[in-house]
Structure formats: C-alpha cells, structure tokens
Image: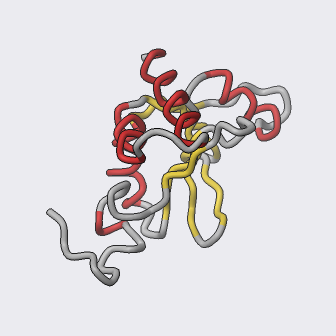
Amino acid sequence: MEQARAALAERIAERRSGGDDPRALVGEMRRSVLLVPMADGGLWSVRSGGVRWICGFTDEAALARFALRHAPGDRPMDYAALLGARIVDELVPALGEPAGLAVDIATEDGSMFFPPVVGIVPDAAAVDAGAAGEGPRS
C-alpha cells in the first residue's frame, strides 16, 4: 500500500514538472489508497471556484502537514483510507454538486487537483459532459 501511495506522489511530481502522461496520472490516482480526513461525521472537503473538493493525502506525512493547520486543538485527526477510484466514481457523484478530488493540498509544490470533468469522474457528475464535440461515452 505504501508503494502505491509513493507512486502517486511521484506521478504528481512528474506531471507538475511538465512530464508524464495525464492519463497515467489519473490511472495512478484511481489505483491509490488515499487518506481522507473526517470532519463533522463526513469526509473533509472545501469549496473553491464553484467546486467542492474532497481532500485526500498520499501518506501520513502529507496528512500530518494538513492536520497541523486544520485539526481541532491537539486532538488527532480521524481519517478514512479510500481507493481513489471509489472517491471519484462513487463519492463525488453522491454529493450532487460539482465535486472533485484535491490530493496533498498541504504539500508545497506537491498538490494535484482532479476536477469534475469527463475522464476523471463519471459523465453524469462531469461539468463538461455534453460540451461541444463531446459525445456520450459508455
């Protein structure tokens, strides 16, 4: 499991430096187990730019950086370990609003956003589904 998380962090670094195939990055995200903080009985998320972002982290160190700023007091932050595919295929559509996945948002030069677009989330949850030139996908 640690190797899969490290592989996603490496793919993010490659993509941020201008390399790697975006489809490979999405595939790696889907295969990776992410640590998603819990808040108020649900998954931690933030709204920005009209999108609700579920926050996931590639490892305990990345989650700890986030918790330093967002955990209530000195209490440990509860989290769920979820497969990236489950987040984007099941949880994002269930929110009923434009939603995506934000990975490692507390890691300087290491974060990556997976927006609610075709190819990342199911077409029914994608904000660009049915855009000019996009036909239905099966």
Above/below status of 7 relative to 24: above
Please determine whether, in this image, residue 79 is positioned above or below residue 112. Answer: above
Which residue is depicted at the point 54% across and 37% down? 12
Side of 80 relative to 37 (left or right): left
Task: Using the rendered view, name the quadrant where residue 128 is placed.
Answer: bottom left
| Residue at 55% across, 47% down | 42
Percent coordinates x, y for residue 103 in the rendering: 57, 41
**In the rendered image, which quarter contains the C terminus?**
bottom left
Quarter of the figure that contains the N terminus: top left
Q: Position of residue 132 (x, y in %)?
A: 32, 84
Task: Name the residue: 42% across, 47% down.
Answer: 22
Find the residue positioned furthest to the left: 138
Structure colour scheme: secondary structure
Q: How many marks?
A: 0
Q: For residue 96, which quarter of the picture? A: bottom left
Q: Is residue 89 above or below residue 37?
A: below
In the rendered image, residue 76, in percent from the top left (x then y), is placed at 72, 25
Residue 2 image position (x, y, % from top left): 48, 15
- As drawn, the residue found furthest toward the front would be 19
Q: Residue at x 55, y 29 (%)?
A: 9
User: In the picture provided, is 104 more to the left or to the right than 2?
Assistant: right
Q: Residue furthest bottom?
A: 132
In the visual, does 77 lie left or right of 38?
A: right
